[in-house]
Amino acid sequence: MSRYTWAPGYCDDGDRPQIVTSRFKYDDGYSLERYLATGGYAGLKAALGRTPTEVHDEVKAATILGRGGAGFPAGTKWGLTPQGVFPRYLVVNGDESEPGTYKDRLLMERDPHQLIEGCLIASYAAGLSQCFLYIRGEMALAQERVATALNEAYAAGYIGKNILGTNFSIDIVLHWGAGAYVVGEETALIESLEGNRGMPRLKPPYFPAAIGLYGQPTIVNNVETLSNLPWLLVNGAAAYTAIGTETSPGTRMIAVSGHVKRPGVYEIINGTTTFREVIYGEQFCGGIRDDNELKAFIPGGGSAPWFLPEQLDLPFEAKMVGPAGSMLGSGAIMVMDHTTDIPAMALTLVRFYAHESCGKCVPCREGGTWLMRIMERVVAGRGTQRDLDQLLEIGQTITPGQYPHAASERLGIAAAPFPFKMTTICFVGPSAYNAVDSALTLFPDEFQAKLMKRTSIPVTAVGAGS
Amino acid sequence: MTDIPVDPNEVRLTINGHEVVSTKGEMVIAAAARAGDYIPHFCYHPRMEPVGMCRMCMVDIDGGRGPMLQPACMVPVAPGMKVDTESPGAKRAQEGIIELLLANHPLDCPVCDKGGECPLQDQTFSHGPGESRYVEEKRHYEKPIAISDLVFLDRERCILCDRCTRFADEVAGDALIHFNSRGNDTHITTFPDEPFSSYFSGNTVQICPVGALTATPYRFKARPWDLAQQESTCTTCSVGCRTVVQSSRDELLRYMGVDSDPVNHGWLCDRGRFNFESVKSPDRVLQPLIHDGTEFVPATWSAAITEVAVQLRAARAAGGVNSIAVLGGARGTNEDAYLWSRLAHEVIGTPNVYPQMGDGLPADVLLLDRATIDQAATASTIVLLAPDLKEELPVLYLRLRAAAEKRRSRIIEFTPKHTGLSRYAWRTIGYEPGTQQSVVEKALADPEIAAQIAKGDVVVVAGRANLAETTVATVAALRSVLAAAPGSRVLPAFRRGNVVGALQVGMRPGEGGLDTRSVLQAAADGKIECLVLLGADPLADFPDTDLARRALAGARRIIAIDTFLTQSTQLASVVLAASAYAEKSGTTTNLEGRVTTVAQQVSPAGNTRPDWMIAAELAMELGSDLGYDTIDNVTDDIAWHVPGYEGITAAAIAAATDGIVAGAPTGIAPLAPIANPIGERNSYDFRLVVSRTMYDEAVGTATSPSLAHLATPSMVHLHPLDLGRVGTTEGAAVKVIGSRATVVLHVVADDSVLRGTVWVPFRHSGANVGDLIDCTAAVNDVRIENI
Amino acid sequence: MSRLNEANVLHAKEIIGRYPKARSATIPLLHLAQQQDGYVTNEAMAHIGELVGATSAEVLGTATFYEMFKFEPVGKYLVNICGTLSCALMGADELLHHAEAKLGIKAGGTTDDGLFTLERAECQAACTEAPCLQVNYRYRFKVTPADLDQLLDDLAAGRLDGEVPPHGTVAKVRQHIPANKAVGAVPPESVTAPPVWISEAAK
Ligand SMILES: Cc1cc2nc3c(=O)[nH]c(=O)nc-3n(C[C@H](O)[C@H](O)[C@H](O)COP(=O)(O)O)c2cc1C
Ligand code: SF4
Ligand code: FES
């Protein structure tokens, strides 16, 4: 048994339950042979031995929270498809692009059969006609591994007509993208899968579960969400909910990046594990690099408002993190130590979202780029107080009202809770402002320090009064 | 107390404190607009699917869970909903959006065509923040690029509202302009070397909320505040789209579409939008002309009228009233046609009056139960026995295309050549000219088609798909459809602007009178002493050119009333200078019988006069006072006397926004069909199909500089698989040999043409396909030979 | 330049056949075109439009939305250095500057020999391995300037030919659905009943 050579901090300490990463310890965890040898496709067999409704009920009972970012329970989502409307489709969201997020790619590269099995179980339970596995375009290895696994599984009779001799038949089609973060948003994903520009559709009025791919009911689920299903079908909902808390059962994968000693992807227990444990725990990241001081961390990917050391003891529980002013998002913690140039780092995120705007909503298309221009100027030391004010003004246009942020004793501010209002269709617009708001709210002095020394330019009086 | 039945689709909501009654499915923005609460917007357009792109229409909507900022263009009304369009939150959002929109928008308003009528400018004033804090570099693009022959795009001004692109895709079906790139780099483009050559491109200019799209004929011509305007009707074809005619300093400058719900939904085709240029053409006939034997000499009106009266009297003396004929009248107003028909029938006394140029269907089609455009566009089944509507009745094409695209209707098309609607048709059934009836009957026997027809609610669009055959087979096919689908309605696809009106108000043969073909035959036989061409050009428009030529040579005297010296009017002894549309007012009748106004917006060019006035003066000269002082007298007289026009008075029309649909005509004598046995096609021959296209040598197009160059030269189109049979290649010149003449044309491989047939567009420059058409033959066959 | 060649047209048809609507194959076919020519040509886009039933303008609109499609020739190796937060925290900027100096081009440029195109990329989903980069979408993790030098030298010398295909090819393994196993894609409008296992379970 050799460790995945570069597997990011993946650790197998034997104590923690492993629901989705159990095969990461094998170099060949992606092969059908290894998969079958380690209990693969038992979940599918278990499912096929029961009625679709029973399988669906099991998934509902487990309350598997969606891992794509919104955290909506998978079983409930499947149940939102309108009665009696067919065909229905499954679209697997493997477009993982949220800054800091890194787990779906591992699941596809290291254990593609587990994902395929999850797709089959979902398709069986929800009565789906076809499944599309949308993999991010830049992930060559994941595409190859999934393609190989699909080819093997077709040959072995796990996919296609009359699976394992039953009347259950489904095709899983590998589809791959071409580089656009916003396509991770489920309605944009559907547009992209239809061959269009990946611009989100407005919802309401319609959610994909009602009107999705080709106007038909469509379930969009994240790779990690579906990868939980094989284990669930083998071990049952009771075993699943025994892990974690009632509102956040099971485990989840967390990528921790930035200034920690052992950055990596860890499968942690949902609901109870705290940020402190993950960042400082010996079995996880082992603390800040060079034993530096923690300055700030982002708890849920580039779109999440930032936390300070004060929030370290919060657990991975949406109910707790929301009121504290942020969100869990897609399982990504980015850690910044005391050496970090906060405005400069915030700029990288603003640049990301400005670059990834689909261009549909004016606030995002124009506002995102404007924010970026101002931030560039500020970071370069040419900003003025007026620029800082303007950042907030643009923020007000994109997300009117109070934007969530963490509490800070030092600054004497209380937490502003999640969520926020927005004038855009999807979250890319607000996300472009997110880092600006966190950085400006929590580290105002760092911006002040960067402003142009001379804040007003003397002008010879012309115009009014002269 | 009786219960007032509640409409189950009715939705009551509150907008800015007052109750508004709306219907299920209506968007908040539309409900608010009806209630007089304007919600600012850019991307929303009532005739297109909402996209929610500009975010300008954000208002506070309380659907039961507290007010939330939501785009009013995307939220459907719901019972009990409370909408506040002016809450502080909404105002802040609107100001913010304007600021962002202006961030990259060049402030070149003083030199922008849109300045003064620009939604962005107006909303900046009404809903904007009052100052811009944007100090960054704006987006830069190469200055305006031509995206088509008629439209320029200035990408710097574009605010990416998706209106033009949605129009191109959703409404016109020509998805040739599209977004390119992403995010802040997004801009509109066409594919390299594939311009936005849509027949409907001008609409994008009209719906652009900024000055990003401009049209050649209007660019830099005027400032909006200098424009005077009136509502009118386009009479380029018989759809009768509602327009606004705009002028400045007595010069026509622009036509815009008006959103008439039953007719054009705001759209115009480019020909209708831009051919007003011909009104200003320097080639117009500006005063009466009398031919002195060698050339035309300008004359006074009284001299010309006297001369015409002299000639008419001489003709009557020489050959009796039956030797006088009046052709035309479909290009004028109802009033023009009515007075001319009175002049012809009552004063001159001739029964030989006809407005169609041998390119329509027999007038008795109008006696059939007539459908409106709306009925056609909502019918379960639309049967097409018609020309290519995209080419000839373009906005009707848009309406029927939408019917198919929105899955309201299924189109069953019978056609000798694939048309613009074939893509959208449920069934396209090709036929070789002459075989319509058997092909239709065979199709009707198909169980699926029969089941579709049996659902009822069938509208048949009937017109002339092929000018190189008689109408016999088409009329027979029409009768077969009507027999199979009793109760269906017919929408006549007659093409000239006011042909239905002209026929109905009296421009049709009296007892024993002749139609156009018979008049021309009589003239060719030397039996016509005086041929009056009322805006008619048989040499150009009558399919059988040879007959037209012999007729004009054989007519002893020709009198023309026209706006231009055409091929035919050049042969006249007197030309009376007629006023054009926009230079005269009155009413017109479209193909569904809808009577609407046409407005005089500029003074008549030179010394021209409207047709009706000319008719009245001629009557006077001939000793009869028709008794009208004003155009309204004539309109009212039509309402009084013409069956079907009861109540359609000048006052009534002025009050009716969408016009008034006239009743069915009476007294149209069914024309005796001329039975012609159809010969078998010799297997070496091709059956000839001839029809018109949007841009040809028609006067209105040829004299409008922006459009004239869009007409292509005449070519012969063959199915690609027939090229080998002839042994020719695309682009090669071939001889097309008919029974009477041979013309040389270049070959186009065209898979919309059926095998065994060839298609040649009518009235294009170069060799004249009319030379190959014998209008007495049931069908015309040609041989193709290499040179 | 070129439309899809015969082999690729066959492949394209196979891909189209997997979707209920042909338009869905647009992006996969654009990849195919890019694999054929190294970038997406106008002719290929027009050809794809014909194959999937879209106008060329629509295909262009779709293609230009996505980062990976190039419309002009790029280097044999496209080097994407990630610059988003996690990588920026770990020195992505220095790495990019180093690459610019080493290759003598600015980000966005291509070396004169046509071997390398350098880009500053956004988050590549390898944040824990920062700073990271991709060469023709093959990852390199925790890249130091020395690693980068080595990588570029190896690529230039052809030592990585087996591992890194020329620009245009992303996945080297493709899905193939065996005809005898395929359920087959049907247009949504021709499906109205629930799948058999649902209807039979309901009985
Ligand atoms: C801007 C944006 C980007 C997103 N990107 C991803 C992504 O890369 N992967 C993903 O699984 N979900 C992403 N999501 C969430 C999806 O919209 C969707 O909620 C998710 O795929 C549903 O799957 P789940 O219920 O299994 O979480 C994104 C959402 C937004 C608004
Ligand atoms: S918020 Fe941005 S990315 Fe999202 S739909 Fe609007 S413009 Fe596109
Ligand atoms: S009008 Fe509603 S978003 Fe543009």
Image (tube, coloured by chain):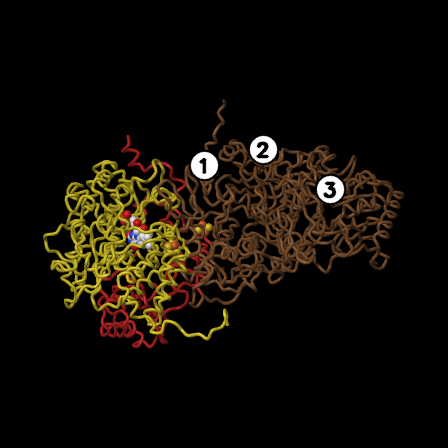
The chain letter corresponding to brown is B
Q: Amino acid at mark 1?
A: Arg
Q: Which quarter of the rendered picture does the N terminus of chain A lie within?
A: bottom left
- Between residue C140 and residue A466, name the one nearer to us: A466
Residues under numbered marks 3 and 1 in contact, where contact means CB atoms less than 8 Å apart? no
Chain A tint as drawn: yellow
Residue A38 rendering spot, x and y as whole percentages = 15, 49
- Specify whether residue A108 is in view: no
Q: Which residue is mark 2?
A: B488
Above or below: residue B496 compared with residue B441: below
Which residue is found at the position 85% from the left and 51% from the top? B302
Q: Are marks 3 and 2 on the same chain?
A: yes
**Residue B35 appears left or right of B743:** left
Q: Quadrant of residue A24?
A: bottom left
Q: Which residue is mark 1?
A: B12
Foreground disc of the pair 3, 2: 3
Q: CA distance from mark 1 to mark 2?
A: 38 Å
Disc nearer the start of the sequence (3/2): 2
- Between residue B534 and residue B202, name the one nearer to us: B202
Crowd band around label 1 with a 10 angstrom C-alpha radius: few (<14), some (14–19), many (20+): some
Crowd band around label 2 with a 10 angstrom C-alpha radius: few (<14), some (14–19), many (20+): many
Please give the chain letter of the residue carrying mark 1: B
Q: Amino acid at mark 2?
A: Ser
Foreground disc of the pair 3, 1: 1
Element type where label 2 sits in the image? loop
Residue B751 rendering spot, x and y as whole percentages = 54, 51
